[in-house]
Amino acid sequence: MGAGRASNAAAHWRRPPQDGGAAQSGPGTPAMLGLVAARQAGLDDPARLRRAERTRRVLSLELNKDRDVERIHGSGINTLDIEPIEGRYMLSGGSDGVIVLYDLENLSKKPSYTCKALFSVGRSHPDVHKFSVETVQWYPHDTGMFTSSSFDKTLKIWDTNTLQPADIFHFEGTVYSHHMSPVATKHCLIAVGTKSPKVQLCDLKSGSSSHILQGHRQEVLAVSWSPRHEYILATGSADGRVKLWDVRRASGCLSTLDQHNGEKSKSSSEAANTAHNGRVNGICYTNDGLHLLTIGTDDRMRLWNSSTGENTLVNYGKVCNESRKGLKFAISCGCNPEFAFVPYGSTIAVYTVFTGELITMLRGHYSTVNCCVFQPHFQELYSGSKDCNILAWIPAPREPVPDDISEKSLPQQHLNPAYEDAWSSSDDEG
Amino acid sequence: MDQRLTELVEELTTSGEPRLEPGRMKELKKICKSSEEHISLAYHLLVTRLQEEHAEMRFSAFQVVQELFARSHHFRTLLIANFQEFLELTVGIDHEQPLPPPKEVAQKLRKAAIKAVQDWHEKYGEAYKQLSLGYHFLKQNKKVDFQDVHARTVAERRREEEKQKRLENIYKEKVKRTEKEMEEMSQEIADTLTEMENCFQLLMPDPFNFGLNDIDLELSKQTSAKEAGPASSLSSQGEVNPSSLGCMDDEQPCCSKDIPPVSQCVTAHGNKQVDEKPEQKEVDGGTCSDVQYSDIKVQENEDNTAIINSVMDAHKLLRNKFWPSVQSWIQLLTRAGVNDDRLRCAIELKNKLETAMKKYKEMNISFKARKRKVDEDEDEDEFVEVPEKEGYEPHIPDHLRKEYGLEPRSPPKAPVAKASTGAAPLSSRTQLKGNEDELDPTCAAATLKLIRDKLPKLPSPRARSSLRKLEERAKAPLMPFGLDLHYWGEDQPSAGKILKFTSEHRFWAPSEVEEEVENKEITEMLKTRYITFAGKFEPVKHKCRAPMPGGTLCERQDRIKCPFHGKIIPRDDSGIPVNAEDRAREEKMKFEKQAAQPEWRDPEFMREVEAATGLDLGSSKSNGKGQKKKGKKQKYPNLTDLKQQANTSRSRLEKKVFNKGAMKRVMKAMNRVDQRKHEKFANQFNYALN
């Protein structure tokens, strides 16, 4: 990535935080220095230092005045996606059907940067979605293609370079969510959750809906492929159930996640085999694919072991969730511990995934947040909200370490005059 | 210092004043300046104040916030970190969380907040990202127009738009209806106008005389009519050709020999006209004040009655039906903003109507009084004139009785006899009155007299007793006839007896069965009669008239007792009881009341003193009622009392009607009714199901 980022990374050498949970340690802690020394001596795994620095950066995420995202959308943002190869281009889908592509790369070599919109599928575009775009996703292996699904009951496959839809799939009901497997090599299936309880699988190779997965009783609000096994799919529905499927098996689902882990005494007959007591509207795998995080309108978030289907019973507390549609949340990558970024009303809550601890609330939006997406390479978070804003949450720059005498002689010198206090000098003025 | 800060914030925010008090503010600033902890504390205190459901409190808190925001970076950081909430509380961006009452202050708060956000954005927007986000959010999402003085939110604007749209729709509908109405009615109007015009022509056979006086008027009318359009039937018929008029005008002197001028011809019935004049004025509504036309008069006579009738009818139709509806059409069309043929058409119609009505007025038709004329017509030929009689003729001369179809009166001495009998016991005046009464055929006395006349002559005492009896009888109430009356004073032979046939067979019957059964109830029923003497309702005519503290007298009209002033007693004009004992009693009560409250503790004076000194001297206690009303002391006396404002008749009723207990009671009653239905119709499937 750009030179700016490299120099930024270099600046981080000075103040190394501790590995793991103690990452909030103060500036210039010996822990960081120790890590660096160990790395230099080759005592440590190189991943360790990386992890420590990533964690520090995620923990210092804040709204930065130097980073802006161009305002193109005239209505709420429903979905965001950053392409996984370079992590440079971001797609956003608005509730008026508009899709915008942003370039996140700062090539200007200045700290202040506004992410420009490279193009947009605006209202005047002939192939624009008629209604709200619910999900956009890049083709996982190449930026030449992306997919978008909308309430106008279609799923469109776009050619990025010509901005023409290469294919359009039509469905019976509104499309809430779709997903393409990020690791699939043997198939090209897009799982689509629509208003109908059947999960549709669209094959990009043949251009047709090849499969139907039956088992849910109400609309399917969230679908997600496992990042570990290419045939494993998780779906969440309004009936409160989360099902795991092996798409090679036609007969039924692999398992249905049960919030009570099969303990009959705790569950009433109705709540048997349900993951949530409300609609399940968000599903996200951890990056290693070993765990699955789901949230529902019962204001709960649950972490599941994706291989056994067991509820890990991590308590996240109340996760406010009033969305009627799918909710897109993100999990960090390569940190220790991992963090989950979950829309929480007009804020974004940051939890540790495995302990359920609420780390912080990111405040900046003025209306309901619909989606957030994590940029794994630079530990940035982008969030889209109903207030038409896409906000970039950037790791806070390190403060200059006061290790120099000359720096000490200039106390309290702010870069911006707006930060200065303006008390009148005379006592009687107050 | 923290204590003092808390106090200061409370005092500042509960002052209820539109401006902050500078002294306290200065002190607050001084404290805040000392350290960041104090700023944080002040921030939290102010946010709590902002959350208060009282616009005045919020407004004051907002003003303090504004002061501190301009001064401290730390305060700015704190506030901006929670800027969403701040906007919700001051601008009211959340529609589910509107600004609290009082309304005017809330409006002021919103305006001030929006202005402040704008100012802050200009000054600090670059440095504080969330501030600029908030500004843009207000601008682009909530569509707050920062230039708009009224600072209306998009919701308000939309509401207004909707209202406008609804109005427009209504107007559209109305215009459509009007158009239809116009289409239907214009034909009718045209017909009526034509009819009227024809009548005018007939009434004024010579148009020159008509046109002579107001030729200019006619001309102008005509031109205007021509401008209005060729379709104006009125003007085409009513107009006088100006050229022909002109030449005729010259000939007028010779013509006048043959045709008498209107004034003359009209005054053929000269003597009558004098009588009719005031009447005619009345008919015209006093509009013939214009002297110019006063010599044109159309006199009604038997030749033109029909025409005048139809003119009058047509005029009435114009004035009462067409004119108002045309007027309303124009009003509606202008209000709806229609500016095309429809409006033009309506105005044209109106002009025509006006012309016709004016013309009608100018005709100065003098009417005979319709009703009377009919009488006269009928009387004139068939009946001989008879001298006017006042009321009923008491005495008919005997020689005329046959003519009236009456029997000749056999003893023509009755009046004399009566006079002799009546004179002794009754005073002459009552006697006279009785006489007069007897003369009136609608009076009971007259009937009596008739009876008396018909009855054979009786000895005088009996006559008197019978007279009294008759009088009593006349007074007695009229009752429906019943069996009890039929057997009055006798035993009813078969009262309450019921024949019983136990056998239904024609002739096979048990011999020993008692065939008659006496039923006591029926016997009673047949022998008794209920008569109720309820009396008549008499409206209360007197008033309480007790003196009120306002100087007026009590206006209540209770029958016996006024709920405020006790028993109603006669009082004079100033409200003082007429009777001495009443007066004494009232004095005593007044004295007792004063004794309970020493004179020097004039409540009003006390209140003033209390307000000035700030001490509670117990003026509120002195008056029992006042104390009850005040209840507990208000927490912040300077703020507008919201409860007082919310205390409307509606809210009080709501409290009663939606009272939980009441609701429960109603619910229970309704459930019970339902339940009963279920029990009753449990065997019917549609009730059994629910």
Image: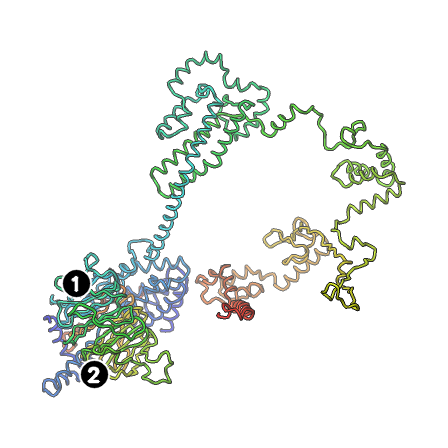
Q: Residue at x 74, y 51 (%)?
A: B480
Query: Circle 1 sits in a helix, a strand or a loop, which is it?
Result: strand
**Depth order, front residue of A420/A68:** A68
Q: Residue at x 89, y 43 (%)?
A: B461
Relative to B581, residue B254 above or below: above
Relative to A198, residue B626 above or below: above
Can the viewer see residue A25 in this picture? no
Q: How is the image coloured?
A: rainbow
Can the viewer see residue B227 in this picture? yes
> For mark 2, what is the residue?
A20
Q: Residue at x 28, y 60 (%)?
A: B141
Q: Residue at x 65, y 26 (%)?
A: B379
Q: Give residue A57's position: percent from left, percent from top.
A: 19, 76
> For mark 1, what is the residue?
A165
Foreground label between 1 and 2: 1
Disc 2 residue type?
Answer: Gly
